[in-house]
Image: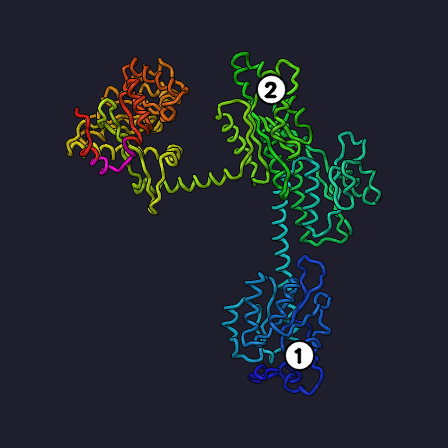
Amino acid sequence: MDSRKCKGPALARQSGDVSVGDIEQETQSQDLFEFHPEPAAGTGASPDQFGAEMRDFTILSVDDDAMFQNSLKLSLSGYTYRGVAPRILIASSANEAAKLLLETPSIAVLLLDVVMETDDAGLRLVRTIREVLGNSQLRIVLLTGQPGIAPMQSSLETYDIADYWLKTDLTNERLHSILTANLRTFEQIDVLNRARRGLQSIVEASNSLARSSGFEDFSRRMIHELAALLGVSEDGIVCVRGRDHEHPPRIIGSAGRFASAINQTLDTINDQSIRELIQRSLDEQASIETEKAQVLFFPGQAVAPAAAAYIATNRLIDDTERELLRVFATNIGTGLINVALTSQLDRIAYEDGLLEIANGNALKRGIQAALEIPPPRRRKVLFIELNQYARSCVSLGVEQGDHLLRAFVKRLAAAFPPPCMIARLHEDVFAVLGPEYLVRIDYVNRLEAGAQTPEALFFGAEAASLDLNHFTSAQTVIATGLLLLKKAGLKGTSGQLIEYDPNVEEETRRRFALSQQLYKAVLNREITVVFQPQIDLTDNRIVGAEILARWTRPDGSTIFPADFIPLAEANGLIVPLGQQILEQACSALRSMDEAGFPGITLGVNVSPVQLGRKEFIDELIATIRRYGLSPDRLELEITETVAMEEQQHADDVLSILRRKGFAIAIDDFGTGYSSLAKLRSLEAATLKIDQSFIAGLGGAGQNETIVEMIIRLGERMNMRVLAEGVETEQQAEWLQSRRCTLAQGFLYARPEPFEQFLARLRNSPVKTV
């Protein structure tokens, strides 16, 4: 035994008082140590009635002095609290005590020596209990044989302990009084904590019950939550009484040993006492408590039948549990009424009114339930879009469209039988959820195969298939499926079938990261322009150049327009970016004027997003005026698709720009679907033949015919025609022989920085004004 632990001042005491410290010092030659009995003074405290029934308590003594531990056990041999002798556990070190506390979280009081394997072992154990184990309920009584090791006042302020005593001050009476006071405190805290945990359980139970999908599901959850609240097994029954009171009550929920009784009548329960207890609760319209069970009665309302919930407890419940049960029952009663209302609204909320199949809400619920299955889930969702519905409604009327939908649903049901769920998301978009062996994308072909009815001839569909193993939320599944359908529709031919590729998600993440980098690049003006000369084929002189954007990142890598312009258009960055490019174009024109090249024009691509802004024209005019330029020095290039699809808006904007003196060029001509009437109304100055057609020149093929038609069209409409992507002399000669006047491409020059382009102007023949 550490001799330091018995040192300390000898405190005065009355005759007959013997302390633990005295016994340690005076009886070391004895094999056993005991506390001497004291005059009968009681424990100094009487148990209060805090609403809890008698229970067992555990006291843990932690001290490396075996003689002290033996003395303690002898002193407590006759001690009781509420008439019950506490269980005594012994530990000889802080590590051993920590293990016991971890294995026995119900310990009520800890008698802890300060000095054991180290001088601060006891205090470190206190921190472990409070901060690591998270046990704030345990009452800790600190004991020491050396007053100076851990001062009382600072220890009480610093550590979460209930009491601090010198061993020399512990008499039999005082020890019992300390234990009684701390057991009472523990009991009171325990009741409060149980009530708090019970109320939290009720809140969680209410949330769980709110997610139930019907009476059967609600009842099953009710039994589970009741059992969890009372800490008993899930042996329970929920019964509802019929409206006529003549038939036996029906079991709508059961669990545990009664699980097989679901959807049966109460008279099928073998235990007569249970039958009588439930029947009595329904007859008397009251809750009943017995020594072995609880029956909760729910009166119901017009929308919900009266119900009784039986749960086997096999014990009496205490006052705290009784009060929690009352609160729980109130929530349950409201929940039962809500379930009744929900069941009536369920058909409206989860069924398509026209086709009487599941709707989008039901699909989302079904997908979410499937996602709760641990992988591999072996579930798929198939999204299908009819490509004739809208035309049928427009041509033949809505009634015929509805007839088409009903016929289509019949074909879906035949191609995808139960357990597949067939749902209509909206108008002509459907979904099929089910096992992967049934929900196969190639089964979509069955919708047309063997059609015997006239309406089946209308069937044509795009489809997208998704494996649920790749997803975590129903909302993401539906959003991804609809997006894939749009992609299928954009492929140009009907009947496209697309399987979801998870690698696409990686590409999406890459584009998102690039979009974030692009924002910083625009903010820091990292995107610059290069110039590709445009040549007059009649004399090989430079007449202008097209400005092309280049993004050079800080690490020196270059991003080309095809990679970042679509991102800029998608997130709105094309507006500030377009303005920066216009600024650079105007600055270059000004520099060329000063260098003696006032006749050179620059072509600048204009995004449909820019054209769509009402401020665009004013901002453009203000920019060229700031640089002192004439509008005809800029040629604004728009794609053929934009010019045709946004024709009305393009007419309005481009008409104003033409009147202001700007030249308009139709870029990538030949790739869209132009009409001569629309093309004439645009009054464009230049048609730019897309480089994909130029690549095929010089050999037999359709490209030559298309290019010749564009050249003739330009001549007839008094437009300049410029060929993009000219790379060979053979292509240039072919174009010149067909009277194409302008060209640009690698044959003449690659896109280059402004200083190189300016040097080219100085060293090459230039078309003068």
Name the residue that disc number 2 marks.
405
- Is residue 38 in view? no
Residues drawn in magenta: 748-759
Number of residues whose C-alpha sits closer than 10 Å to that of mark 2, classed few (under 14), some (14–19) or many (20 or more): many
Where's the N terminus, which quadrant?
Answer: bottom right
| Helix, strand or loop status at disc 1 | helix
Which residue is more in the foreground, 233 or 39? 233
Number of residues whose C-alpha sits closer than 10 Å to that of mark 1, classed few (under 14), some (14–19) or many (20 or more): some
Name the residue that disc number 1 marks.
66
Q: Quadrant of residue 354?
A: top right
| Helix, strand or loop status at disc 2 | helix
Q: Is residue 755 magenta?
A: yes
Q: Position of residue 378 (x, y in %)?
A: 64, 38
Which residue is more in the foreground, 611 or 591? 591
Question: Spatial distance from mark 1 to mark 2, Cα to Cα?
Answer: 87 Å
Q: Residue at x 54, y 26 (%)?
A: 496
Where's the C terminus, which quadrant?
Answer: top left
**Looking at the picture, does residue 612 appear above or below residue 517?**
above
Which residue is more in the foreground, 17 or 585? 585
Which residue is more in the foreground, 236 or 572? 572
Q: Which mark is residue 596?
A: none
Q: Nearer the viewer, mark 1 or mark 2?
A: 2
